[in-house]
Amino acid sequence: MSASATGETIGAILILVGAIMAVISAIGVLRLPDVYTRSHAGTKSATLAVLLTLTGTFIYFWLTDHYISIRLILGIVFVFLTAPVAGHLITRAAYRSKVPLTETSVEDELKKVLNEESYNDPESDGGALKKEEDG
């Protein structure tokens, strides 16, 4: 088996797996109950889908045409770094905007942490109210 045939096979498999992950991600975004779980499905599996697709494309061109694409490498790095951070920030903004969790959620671990943070921060409204109540 030649390098170009191997490159075509590996590239096709990675692109196919990336497409399957994209479908799983889309199903997760449609079926999951609240913004937090949807964000998880959207960022984790969609990022993996894009990375697999770009990696498959990179390997295909590298092994068949002997062409190393800097644009594909930069795309892989950019998606790998920015997509999880963007998902985290969107979820954090939703939580701080008091978007409710689904009814099936068992525990809200951030509630205690954020309440203590606002109590210790004199600039926040929660801390000012607590201090007025105490003194």
Image (cartoon, helix red, strand yellow):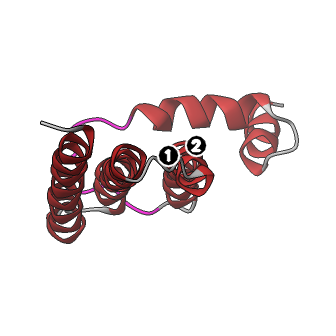
Majority SS type along the magenta span: loop
Q: For the magenta stretch, what is the residue range?
A: 99-108
Left or right: 53 in relation to 31: right
Compared to residue 109, the image places residue 92 above or below, namely below
Q: What residue did someone put label 2 on? A: 81
Left or right: 36 in relation to 99: left
Task: Quadrant for the N terminus, please.
Answer: top left
Q: Name the one closer to the observer, 133 or 125.
A: 125
Q: Does the magenta portion include 105? A: yes
Q: Residue visible at 41% across and 31% down?
A: 109
Q: Residue visible at 86% across and 36% down?
A: 122
Residue count near mark 1 (Cα–Cα under 10 Å), binned few <14, some 14–19, many ≥20: some
Compared to residue 120, the image places residue 22 above or below, namely below
What percent of the width, then of the height, locates residue 50?
37, 56
Residue count near mark 2 (Cα–Cα under 10 Å), binned few <14, some 14–19, many ≥20: few
Q: Does the CB distance between marks 1 and 2 fall below 8 Å?
A: yes
What percent of the width, then of the height, locates residue 59?
36, 44
What percent of the width, then of the height, locates residue 2?
19, 38
What percent of the width, then of the height, locates residue 124?
80, 46
Left or right: 43 in relation to 81: left
Dot 2 amino acid type? Leu
Mark 1, secondary structure of its residue: helix
Left or right: 94 in relation to 21: right
Compared to residue 106, the image places residue 113 above or below, namely above
In the displayed orientation, state which residue is furthest to the right: 123
Q: Residue visible at 25% across and 49% down?
A: 11
Task: Quadrant for the C terminus, please.
Answer: top right
Q: What residue did someone put label 1 on? A: 84
Residue at mark 1 to residue at mark 2: CA–CA distance:
7 Å
- Disc marking residue 35: none
